[in-house]
Image (cartoon, helix red, strand yellow):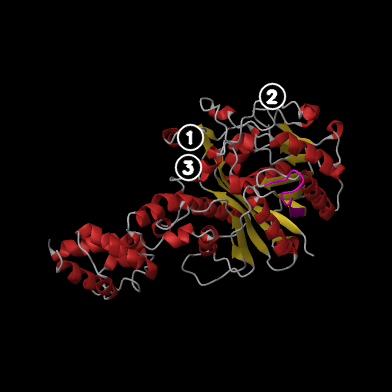
Amino acid sequence: MQEKEVFDKIVGIIGPFAKNKESLNNVTNDSNILKDFEVNSSRLVDIILALEDEFDIEISDEEAEKIETIGDATNLIKNKI
Amino acid sequence: MRRVVVTGLGVIAPNGHGLVEFENALRNSVSGIRFIEKLAELKFGCQVGGIPQNVDGLLPNYFSEEELFAMNEGMVYTGIASIDAWKDAGFSVPERNGNEVNWDAGCIVGVGLGGMDTISEKLIPKISEGKVRRMGSTMVEQCMTSGITAKLSGLLALGNQVSTNSSACNTGTEAIIESVDRIKYGLADRMLAGGSEGSSPFTWGGFDGMKVLSAVFNDKPQEASRPMSQSAAGFVPGSGCGILLLESLESAEKRGARIYAEILGTSLNCGGHRNGGSMTAPNPDSVQNCIKDALKKANITGDQVDAINGHLTATMADPIEVNNWSKGLNRSPENFPYINSTKSLIGHCLGAAGSIESVACVLQLHKGFVHKSLNCHDLHDEIKPFEKSVVQETKDVDIKILAKASFGFGDVNGCIIYKKWE
């Protein structure tokens, strides 16, 4: 799977949880999931579950804690698939 | 003590959403009772029920995708009816990302069996399968009994008391009464008050198991809910939410609000499971005392009551209730006020019953009519002496004072005296 495809799928999963929908129009690897998209921090659990299902991978709690940006998620997932 | 008035109404009921649809349904005897395929599949005795229709189409008008991710049926009904009541009272819905809090506005919205859809469809299956860690983040906020009001406070930036009460089928009425007190004593200027109930078979199943639901009209759903009828065969379960925006008279007048009605007096009590009372049956003394106490607090006598909106569920308790009203109001059958049952149209909406029916009460006072009590042309023998008071056809009549009561498992009672605002 190409990096761009992984990136797009991640953004697609996070989209419904974003309170700031406008921020979805200009997503980069540096986009911060909590601060830029205004995702409720408790929903990170649901995003991780959705990523696991989408890419058929397992993400440990330690790995999940390190995900702050879209780039962090893309890199982690790219190395697991 | 401050006077308390109703300045906003919101309702999502099995026979209509919003005041226009609901009033039309009341006036034209539109039943919200339908055959429920799922209940048949699950081999319920009662296979009919009342569920608000076409709710999915309403959702985008009220909630964001992000909000809906963590909302179950009861939370959705609460949100819709509350936002409607808030707007009906002339307030605008605040921006979700704003910083203003309505410190003088709160809510008490109750539920009989909260979050049952989430508990049965997600919580129990996931935990039973050993998949706790795959449940996600939304279980607690949806399953906690206060989930409905916890969510509501965020929708409308409510900063006063925000809580959920529960007293079985008296829940909605109790929420209104507790909210009245909060305003009366100056602790809040306005309160959203009512009850909400979902339609999960797991909510209704316990009642079917007790054989208190109607099981003999499954092929004629609209005839199944028949309070005061000789052929009543148990209640029909319903769901939805009714909300009253209650406000101090002072606050309502100051902002020039439209006032529907005043709440003159209220009463809450319990029969203590004595003298005929039990977990499931009312102590007649406590019911009569509850009615008398509400009259006393309203500073009126029973002969000033023009109409009764009863609890009247379509069980063996209906004739007992009518007799209790007669004694509580000190009105003989010859001199009895109008009496009807909104449950004849929507079923028994459990924790939401008292408040959906209170919306019907306030609409009847405000618009000057009493709605037909459906399916009681064959009046129960013990109610026949009151025949001329039972509303058999909707009629325009300028009623001024209406008494509403709800009774619940646990032998609990609530009574509210509404007065038309003129």
Image quadrant in which you'd find residue A45 = bottom left
**Residue B201 bears which disc, if any?**
3
Image quadrant in which you'd find residue B31 = top right
Whole-angstrom CA distance, mark 2 to mark 3, is 30 Å
In screen coordinates, is A29 left or right of B69? left
Whole-angstrom CA distance, mark 1 to mark 2, is 27 Å
Q: Is residue B257 above or below residue B390?
A: below
- Asked if the residues shown at circle 1 and circle 2 are in contact, with their CB atoms under 8 angstroms apart, the answer is no
Q: Which residue is mark 2?
A: B377
Estimate how packed mark 1 is, as few (under 14), some (14 to 19) or many (20 or more) residues with alpha carbons within 10 Å: some
Q: Is residue B71 above or below residue B47?
A: below
Residue drawn at x 61%, y 55% is: B166
Asked if one can make out residue B60 in the rendered structure from this viewpoint, the answer is no
- Asked if the residues shown at circle 3 and circle 1 are in contact, with their CB atoms under 8 angstroms apart, the answer is yes
In the rendered image, residue B32 lying in the magenta stretch gets the answer no
Asked if one can make out residue B364 in the rendered structure from this viewpoint, the answer is yes
- Quick one: quadrant of the N terminus of chain A? bottom left
**Chain letter of disc 1?**
B
Q: Nearer the viewer, mark 3 or mark 1?
A: 1
Residues at marks 1 and 2 on the same chain: yes
Whole-angstrom CA distance, mark 3 to mark 1, is 9 Å
Q: Which residue is mark 1?
A: B44
- Dominant secondary-structure state across the stretch colored magenta: loop
In screen coordinates, is B177 left or right of B144? right
Residue type at mark 2 is His
Residues in magenta? B266-278
